Image (cartoon, rainbow, N blue to C red):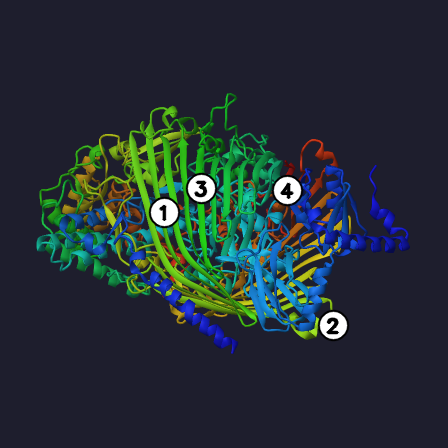
Amino acid sequence: MYKIYSEHFVLPPGYTKKLLLFMKLTTLMLFLAFMQVSASTLAQKVTLSERNASLTTIFEQIRNQTGYDFAYTTSTIKAAKLVTIDVKNVDLNEVLDRIFSGQPLNYTIENKSVVVSIKEASLFDQLSAKVKAVLNIPTEIGGTVTDTLGHPLVGATVSIKGKNLITQTDSKGNFSFPNMPQGNYTLVVSYIGYEKLETSITNTGKYEHLAFVLRLGSSQLDQVRVIAYGTDSRRFSVGSVSTVTAADIEKQPISNPLLALQGQAPGLNVTATSGIPGSQVLVQVRGQNSLNLTQIPNQNPQKPYDQPLFIIDGVPFASQNNNVNQFASLVAAQSNSGGINPANTGISPFGNIDPADIESISILKDADATSIYGTQGSNGVILITTKKGKPGATTFDLNVNTGFNSVGRPVQLLNTQQYLQLRKDAYASDGVTPTNDPNNFLGYAPDLTIFDQNKYTNWGKVIYGQNTTNTDVHGSLSGGSATNTFLISTGYNRSTYNYPGDFADQRYTLHSNIHHNSQDYRLTIDLTTDFGYDQNNSAGFGGGTDVVLPPNLPNLRDPSGNLLWNYKGVDLTSDQFYSTLLQPTDLQNYNFNTAFHISYKLFDGLSIGTNLGYNRNTTDENSINPGVAQNPAYLNRQANFSANTFQTVNIEPQINYNKNIGKGVFSALIGSTYKKNTNNSTYTTGQGYSNDNFLGSINSAPTVAAMDGYNIYKYSAGFARLNYIYDSEFILNLTGRRDGSSNFGPGRQFGNFGSVGAGWIFSEEKIFKKSPSVLSYGKLSGSYGTSGSDGATAYQYQALYASFPNYLPNFQGIRPSFPFNLYNPDYSWALKKSLNLALDLGFFNNRLLFNATYYRDRESNQLVNYPLPIQSGFPTVLGNLDATIQNQGLEFAVSSTNIKAQNFTWKTNFNVSFNRNKLLAFPNLANSSYASTYEIGQPTSIIYGYKYKDVNPQTGLFEFYTKNGTVTSSPAYGPASTGGDEVPIGNLEIKYTGGLGNTFTYKQFSLYIFCQFSSRNAPNYLAEIYSTNQLGLEYNQPVAVLNNYWKAPGDVAQLQRLASSYGSTAIGPAIRFPQSSGAYGDDTYLRIKTASLSYQVPNTLLNKVHIKAASVFVNGQNLLTFTDYKVGDPETPGVFTSFPIQRILAFGLNLKF
Amino acid sequence: MIMKKIFFTINKTVIGLVFVALSFASCKKLIEIPANPPSSITQKQQFADSSTAMTAIAGIYAYNAGNGFAYSDAALTYSTGFSSDELSYTRSNDNQQFYNYTLTPLNTGISSLWSYPYQSIYQVNAVLNGVTNNSGLSSSFQKQITGEMEVVRSLYYFNMVNLFGGVPLVTSTSYSTTDRLPRATVAAIYTQVLTDLTDARKKLTATYPSAGRARPNLYTAIALLAKVNLYQNNWQSAYNEADSVIRSGNYNLEPSLNNVFLDGSNEAIWQLPANQGYYGVADAQYFVPFFSTPGYLLTAPLLNAFETGDQRLQNWVASTTVNGNTVSYPYKYKNTSASTTPTEDQMVLRLGELYLIRAEAAAHLSNLTQALADVNTIRARAGLAASTASATSQVAVLNAVMHERQVELFCEWGNRWYDLKRTGTAAAVLGAEKTGFSANAELYPIPQAQILLNNLLTQNPGY
């Protein structure tokens, strides 16, 4: 029925020529009477939605819908551009106009056939052109620049090669070079995020309206990415910025978006503190800049781990990455001794942000990228940008998946027989006879003398053995026109705990964005609103580490489920694991974020605008200790209620200015910031309730205690960024900021920060241009600048007295107060100076991109909670420390499209980073509190300890080297400087870390495999045994210790003889062991972090059921780990009893309507 | 040329705007916050008048770990109880290290025995700073408070020197001078203690400054002075001071043993309200078992020291059965909840101890009759007959005094541990009763963390 001309035309070559001639003639005739044709209206309506489709595809679709045939030859449309169009029920002629706009083609309609021909000038035009050519009259060269959807690109740069001429498009995308002499010109059109277009034209003296259509950059080099107060592309950037996009995030079955960053960006460390749903994820950019003292016991420094500034849609996240919980629960009970302070574990505020709502995450690392944030950016900045609507037909996108979780690396513990043997060996080793009499406390061993010797409970299985599920549903509705777009999305996530009981983290989110441009594109309004509700039910504190309970422990519950508190007179209170399950801790976190942006273009090149942002993050918690969970011998029903609110108000008026100067483009951003941060918290405890059913309310509590907390931070700044790009080849970027912070005392509140960045795109040089080479892009760039840090709490510059917490009684009717802090009126900004040098290369038409970056950050005038010996009254005082810490490193990133065939593509992304930290200077270190903690020239993660030798075969005790090289089982405490035997035994710095991702697509199938790897020196599992669960005491142990401990003289063993109590003589060496090199080891792993397989259902099947697209997928997380690290998870080294990192396998479905 | 043009443009259009932006930033108004957070006030406001100043003083007597009376958490009692021959410990943690002298500088109990007193001493020094020469406070108030603070400070240093030997002597709040102080000598600490108490004696009056006997009066200073002088072998001073307290007529032994530790006890010289929140006095909370197995058991040597018929064994010791074995625990304080009546208070100094101080001093001064009389006063209250010690043998009388101290003052303020050490009998007694004792064990180690923070601190020998 249909004639497919193109196929026939190709076959006989001669025939084609004839037809062409005929076509040309026809065209000529048609042009002479062109009014007749274009006036004819076509009643046919067309609906099309295509991106970057070839004309043949479009024609096919129109033919299907209208019955119109298309007459053309393959060579005619050879020069045609790809078409992106999105129309619904639009007249055919309008659709055709759109399709042919900007194409070097014309079309005519004859008898339900569309005849396509190469565009040629009319006779009159040809004539007048000839006249003009003869007279050589200068003519305007002008036209429009649009994107493939036909939207004008405002501010695109158009330059004429070889001439000193450059202009920018106006608000309708128009540009013009008036009075250009006739001749040949090469026009270069560029716009951030779009592929550069270079076209040769001939000015014949006749004005021709040039229509340039820029295509979205398909190369990563030209993709738009979010930076501080704007966007840029990698091509023209001189700053160090990494981005992770929605495409990378959506393949990972994770519920905390920070986890999606793991291994994805060079220079970024992401650490999961545990596998508990909702738990904290720590993030660090390019190493630790400030001195921290997490390795010193009895200290609780306020700033233990540098984390970057988090900004969501331009609004600083109110809680930043701090724990939002106030109550200790199963979540907070986790301790990660792998160099991270346990104070950082808790509920993550980012658990309330749906990863599916995130469009991109930018990680700003160097001074050029972060200086504009002044004092806030010194530890790097993470910008999270949420999804926005896209013009086009209204689309509903539904994503559903269910995951199945299990322990990533389970730890096998001893069974009853093995455990009892271990305990007997311990008593034998101490020469003590186990007894059932508590008066003989050294020999008192109820597990050996009173408990059933054959009973076996696998506590690891009871506590972590459940396979649990993870359900995620996300729906989003979006669409709009060129000037108005919208997006509304909602999500639900439920992750259950791998823990007995009904514990889960549930999240409900609602995200929306509306975007409006006025018809003349002068006014722009953008409003993004996010609401998230997260509910985390968890159990009472400390239940997790109960995996080391004796395996022959008597029943802790009677057959009807009541808790048992003693067995034959032996008190079981401290072993009563099930009690914690009956003490639910319920956390509800509400996150509300709204970002409003308005800008108005006063005239081309200058626009003014404002960002208004508000973020409120509120957490309500409720935990109860009901009677059923308690020993009836001492009953105190208790309920705790707390609220914790973080708020940020952020106002940032801005002026943007763009102008072409010479062969370059100059742009300026001037703005100011007003920010107010508050944190209010309350904590109420009710005691002595008469009935468990009252525990939901404070009203029934006979005794009530309440506390509150308050912090305020105000910040204001003026900032400017000046950028000049000369001839698309040389880039200069200057930023500056003047900051004021309320955290400092009078006279110290203001500081100035700035940076200089420069780049040279050397591939623009003639030498590269002339000869075709594999190198398609090359850039050298560098930046140097300063940023600061005011990371302190308010009011520390004066001496304060505070009241005793409310739960303590008055003293004789007087509310007692106590000195709250040591004060130091003189502290001020820490200063970080950053140098960044980068080489960017693109090969094979930018199919392979390579980046190498060297950086060197030096933070001085450190603002720290300076630790003091307690004899001074307080453990710390806030102050500046005249020490300099350097972080320098190398980062490499490669992204490549290895194979791009019709049905098969293979893409690879790889990054690796090496950070080296060093204490450069510390005047008077020897006489400071840090004398025994740091060493000049060494990393700050240095650890002091004893050099471990081995187990003495005769005494059976651990042996260590003293500082003089002699061997002893009781080395002297403290570093050599204080007369002890501790020497630097290593450092906990991550040696290298990175990620490798491969994406394969074959027809409808897509497979993504992402591996993350890391290498460091870290505590091994023995660190936990010998610091908390002494080997030989009443704790179960990993099977790894079996047959590995010393028993009799002559034994060559890995572990020393067992201790039966803290009174054992083996205890001295045992508690020294965690401070020795024996407790540290290599922690190198490669983990298949994500594996995702998806299948795109073919459209032919879907059209019938009115589904635009559908795919099914299976995503895996933490599937496989390659490591030599023994016992426990290498990601959370040094602890094997904490809530384990989960292996997730998720099955899902994605539908687009 | 181009650069010139750029600069021109910058000058013309941008610089002006930069100034606008910067002036916005420099506006101090934008970053103004209230003068103090709602939950705290400045030091100046704190000592503006006597009633506000009293809240800071209340903060010294009220218990709050790290910020308040340092020895209300029973740690001093049980740690020294393990180290001497009073207590053993049934749970597996590093408290057991006190018992058989395997203590290390990493021990967590040691850390609080060191930290809390220093945090309290800072509070005391801060109050002394705040009231001294403060024109907003009356001179009588200044005098009263200064005297009280000196008594409190001397109590802390007295215990510190007995636990650790010489310790850094901190008498100021300036961290830049105190953070690098090395250990002072034992003599220097005692000099400071005696100076403080002597000065307090001049400043305080016989009237207690507030309800009950919660804040030191003149006799508190004298009683503590008696104890310090006894430890320093200043027998005559100890005798005179103990004597003046006993003779003051303000204090009487409680006839019933069960009333000794109650609020309002006539025997109390210094007695702090129970500040353990809901729980009452910490000693009861720690020693009286909530559940079946007590954590802290009285040892056989102590239980055997009680003579038959000693009412103290009936009233101050309690027992329970675990798996058929009888175990005993201290029962001087009985209330595990603050709401239980009658109310118990934390006893710091009581007349019973003063009788025994006078007895010991008298024995050394060869006034053996007086010594035996005082011992018998205490024995009579416990339902025992007069001591059988020969009234002509100083050794026998001293032994009688020391025996009476063991059973009267057990599990109170480390008296037994201090007595064994100061009388040079620790090695003989403890060496015989359990293994591991050495002369070095008489001083606890300085916490390792503190040495790391101040490397001028030297560790005690043997650690």
Tell me if mark 1 has few (under 14), some (14-19) or many (20+) residues whose alpha carbon lies within 10 angstroms of its own.
Answer: some
Tell me the distance, in whole angstroms, between the alpha carbons under discs 4 and 3: 37 Å
For label 2, the residue is A771
Query: What secondary structure is found at the residue carrying circle 3?
Result: strand
For label 3, the residue is A591
- What amino acid does circle 1 point to? Asn
Of residues B237 and B288, the one nearer the viewer is B288
Query: What secondary structure is found at the residue carrying circle 1?
Result: strand
Ranked by sequence position, the earlier of labels 2 and 4 is 4
Tell me the distance, in whole angstroms, between the alpha carbons under discs 1 and 4: 49 Å
Q: Position of residue B26 (x, y in %)?
A: 33, 63
| Residue B92 appears left or right of A82 | left
For label 1, the residue is A679
Asked whether the residues under the numbered discs 1 and 3 touch, taking CB atoms below 8 Å apart as contact, a structural biologist would say no
- What amino acid does circle 2 point to? Ser
Q: Position of residue A986 (x, y in %)?
A: 54, 62
Of residues A668 and A16, the one nearer the viewer is A16
Label 4: chain?
A
Q: In the picture shown, does residue A699 fall above or below A256?
A: above
Viewer-nearest of labels 2 and 4? 4
Asked whether the residues under the numbered discs 1 and 4 touch, taking CB atoms below 8 Å apart as contact, a structural biologist would say no
Ranked by sequence position, the earlier of labels 4 and 3 is 4
- What amino acid does circle 4 point to? Val
Of residues B298 and A386, the one nearer the viewer is A386
Ranked by sequence position, the earlier of labels 3 and 2 is 3
Can you tell which quarter of the image residue B14 is in? bottom left
